[in-house]
Amino acid sequence: MRYAVLGTGIVGRTIAGKLAALGHEVAIGTRDVEVTLARTEPDAYGNPPIAQWLAQHTQVRLLSFADVATFGETVVNTTEGAASLQALEAAGRDNLAGKILIDIANPLDFSAGMPPSLNPVNTDSLGEQIQRTFPELKVVKTLNTMNAAIMVEPSRVTGEHNVFVSGNDTGAKKFVSELLTSFGWPEGSVIDLGDITTARGTEMLLPIWLRLWGALGHADFNFHIQGARTGA
Amino acid sequence: MRYAVLGTGIVGRTIAGKLAALGHEVAIGTRDVEVTLARTEPDAYGNPPIAQWLAQHTQVRLLSFADVATFGETVVNTTEGAASLQALEAAGRDNLAGKILIDIANPLDFSAGMPPSLNPVNTDSLGEQIQRTFPELKVVKTLNTMNAAIMVEPSRVTGEHNVFVSGNDTGAKKFVSELLTSFGWPEGSVIDLGDITTARGTEMLLPIWLRLWGALGHADFNFHIQGARTGA
């Protein structure tokens, strides 16, 4: 399977690296390839420049949003929430048509400082915005409720814990659930919440996630719905 | 200890019943005692009239908000979020002064139908509104992230799961944590998220809680933060 990963941050790199390790063809998309490759400083989160990462992952190519969307049979959105709709516009409606979009982005709003709030929130979500704006996509919201390292290596957190899926297309959710299994998510750990409006609930986990990160002093934790399985 | 429980719904009854069973003196507060006692129909959630419940719990009295606030050394808010500030006004600022308020309410907004949204949300919370409006109270937000039955009988859900506390007063949070222990919450299951602004995070768990309730078909589940304890 050919995967297009939109976004060059730590989530994009982590997902792209895992997909490549699993034998998929992977390309990462960015707004301007030249500008992105020319960066020599760590990003705002202290991650090394993407050029350095690409040099260590030579099987992953860096392409423009439009080229990567053409390349990918399945698309993964790991851009910042505030930039996601623009990135998808740049990817091109025709290039996205009919494809599954795995949406991992969260609509964090840093405009009023820390901790960030969410926008949209409560009566809307980024997942819904994307599905509404690009009805030709099959949007599945998932993996947006945990640290990037756990997304592709759930065993970093000992014991049972969960990943949620939200989306309108049953087949797309099945496809994504199987991909999650290939990432190491055990059978029964994937909870299908329902249609894409349920993305409100998972995006709204971010505020407590950020506070837990602060209270615990580490990010190697995840939500577990105790009692979700009969007898478990 | 004398406890005042504001609100006659299922959460108020459950908390009042547990406190009485633990040997505390308990009274439930309502806007108008005569009107409340005169109800003969089940409430909107199908719970029998409070008069029937009181007949089965003769050690619990029903008082006006003002009388119950005078009676209680510690106050528990289980009113509907949209009515909480009014209930506390009716309880009386002087009657509340210096007391711990255990806030279990959620600011659910049903004005646009189901599922409810939250108001306030995102950049504010009901817990903060109450603390801001009644600075003489020591507000501790807790127990608002689960079904009422689990609040006072956590063993209904098999395995480890968590309850959160948010508040500005360390002593008040310690008091509430000990009360939770007496309810059956094991050592280590109480997570102190920080000051009262962290109530945003727990109130914002409601949207996913409601969707999980729908997806699972039962309410005997709770959030567990896997990885919160070293080696656990």
Image (spheres, coloured by chain):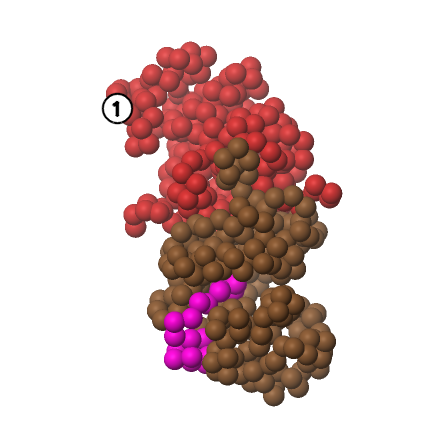
Chain colours: A brown, B red
In this view, the residue in front, B150 or A64, is A64
Give the residue displayed 57% in from the left and 25% down from the top: B183
Name the image quarter holding residue A17. bottom right
Residue A202 placement, left or right of A57: left
Relative vertical location of residue B120 with respect to residue B93 in this rendering, above or below: below
Letter of the chain that mark 1 sits on in the rendering: B
* Quadrant that contains the N terminus of chain B: top right
Name the image quarter holding residue B83. top left
* x then y, percent, for residue A128: 39, 62
Q: Amino acid at mark 1?
A: Glu
Give the residue displayed 37% in from the left and 18% down from the top: B53
Relative vertical location of residue B2 with respect to residue B199 in this rendering, above or below: above
User: From this viewpoint, is residue A63 visible?
Assistant: yes
Over which residues does the magenta segment extend? A86-108
Disc tally is 1
Name the image quarter holding residue B186. top right
Crowd class of label 1 (few under 14; some 14 to 19; many from 20; radius 10 Å): few
**Mark 1 sits on what residue?**
B41
Relative vertical location of residue A30 with respect to residue A24 in this rendering, above or below: below
* x then y, percent, for residue A34: 61, 88
Relative vertical location of residue A140 with respect to residue A60 in this rendering, above or below: above
In this view, the residue in front, A163 or B114, is A163
Membership of A104 in magenta stretch: yes
Give the residue displayed 44% in from the left and 44% down from the top: B212
Membership of B77 in magenta stretch: no
User: From this viewpoint, is residue A118 visible?
Assistant: no
